[in-house]
Amino acid sequence: MHELSIATAIVDRAAELARADGTDAVAAVTVRVGELSGVVPKALDFAFEVARDGTALAEARLVVEAVPARAWCEPCAAEFPVGMPPFFWCPGCDRPSTALRSGRELEISRIEPRA
């Protein structure tokens, strides 16, 4: 389960960012997870509970914001959902897209300090 190594990295980075902001206690970490990132949100949530134990994030909760996969069609000048499994053919003109606009994100977007 690679989510455990990802959760460990999230805990480490969130603790580092919290310290830089002058706090050592974190209430919540919000993470944006793209549909095509290869990360299973439920597995990440479970792994986060394991990884946070004994750290400044021991009582923190993980908030996962799902980011849908979307591609861009140049001929149509339109964005369209890719779905899962991914399908990169434009529904408007039936041509393949080579521009993925979103869906591969895996990033911390917010750290909420504990009061």
Image (tube, rainbow, N blue to C red):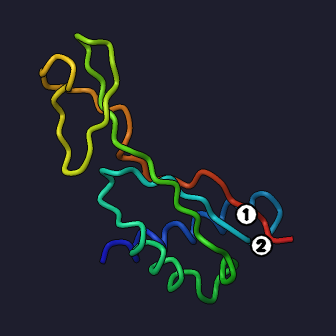
Give, as a three-letter code, the residue at label 2: Asp
As drawn, 115 above or below 65: below
Label disc, if present, on residue 18 of the rendered structure? 1
Indicate the quadrant where residue 6 lies: bottom left
The C terminus: image quadrant: bottom right
Indicate the quadrant where residue 25 lies: bottom right
As drawn, 50 above or below 75: below
Measuring from the top left, give residue 57's x and y in whole percent. 66, 77
Residue at point 31%, 29% (across, down): 80
Residue, disc 2: 24
Q: Which residue extends farthest bottom?
A: 54
Q: Give the alpha-carbon distance from disc 1 to disc 2, as whole Å.
A: 6 Å
Which badge, 1 or 2, comes first in the chain's sequence?
Answer: 1
Residue at point 38%, 38% (across, down): 102
Give, as a three-letter code, the residue at label 1: Ala
Q: Secondary structure at mark 2?
A: loop
Residue at point 66%, 83% (across, down): 58
Cβ–Cβ under 8 Å for marks 1 and 2 = yes
As drawn, 35 above or below 80: below
